[in-house]
Amino acid sequence: MKKNLLILILSALCFNSGFTQHAGKQWLDLNYANDEHIFHKLDIHLPSVEKPKYKAIIVIYGSAWFANNMKQMGFQALGKPLLDSGFAVISINHRSSGDAMYPAQINDVKAAIRFIRANADIYNIDASFIGITGFSSGGHLASLAGTTNGVKTFTVGEKTVDIEGDLGNYTQVSSAVDAVVDWFGPIDFTRMENCTTTKDDKSPEAALIKGNPADNLDMLALINPMTFLDNKDPQFLVIHGDADNVVPHCQSVFFSNSLKDKGLLNEFISVPEGQHGPATFNENTFKKMSDFFLTEAKKK
């Protein structure tokens, strides 16, 4: 699927979710990397019910990693149920695959988390709990953030990547997250085509790694959240429609099985006739997300 078409589809499914977002205090276009780039900006939205501090959820938009400024769309997609549940919602931008190859995208996510944790008091955030969620490629990045808590660099075969990165002013602050909700994210790029093999060199993941997936299996392992799984990772909720024609449903089956083996799977929700957003985003799944985060937040 071409880049512009995919972004239009994702934009349409989110902006037509049927919800009107409302928040209390907010801070928009904060730069978390101490530079002037739009792809390093985030928005903080607080609930309308006033409290001294709010536990937080970071939201990542989906765009097949092609977009670098869709944080408002990410908030519109997932913000309301989280605000209504009493969480601060932080919607972030990140570099696109056109701006930089992987691991730039996860470096950005981790820099945003560090920024929020370091400045929590300024923005009325209770940093004892920071959850993360995202849909499509945002689900991939949210999942990767969750499975790489404490990971600095990682090597597979002859490839080594710097997962943590050194963006921003808070490199000594933890980028760990405490719970993850993955909405239909791609996970295992060696099985994206018909659930069995790699896609071609025109695929979004090819743009992400700047190479033909079939010729870069070590790098595919290094963008796969399952590569980093260990028993210290947070709990996950995974949601995927069984009629998704963009990210195969089997991707979440693979991921959920691996999470379950490690004792990290809270629940895998397979939505009947759910597509890449439509039907999969619904009142029940939004409530499942909010309830999961509330349960995990109570543990902190």
Image: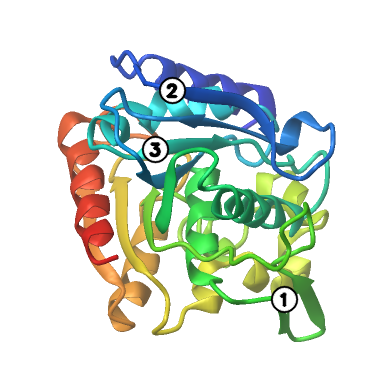
**Depth order, front residue of 277/99:** 99
What kind of element bears circle 3? Answer: strand
Disc 1, disc 2: CB below 8 Å? no
Image point (48%, 43%), residue name: 136
Question: What residue is shown with label 1?
Answer: 218
Residue beneath disc 3: 88
Amino acid on which the number 2 mark rests in the picture: Lys
- Give the residue at x 28% y 14%: 18
Q: How is the image coloured?
A: rainbow
Q: Which numbered disc, 2 or 3, marks the residue closer to the eye?
A: 2
Query: What residue sits 39% from the left and 30% below the top?
Result: 46
Instruction: Provide residue 271's location: percent of width, then percent of height.
Output: 21, 43
Residue 25 got which mark? 2
| Res. 232 image quadrant | bottom left
- Quarter assignment of residue 280: top left
Q: Earlier in the sequence, mark 1 or mark 3?
A: 3
Query: Is residue 228 left or right of 47 when viewed as pictured?
Result: right
Secondary structure category for the residue under label 1: helix
Q: Which of 273/155 is in front? A: 155
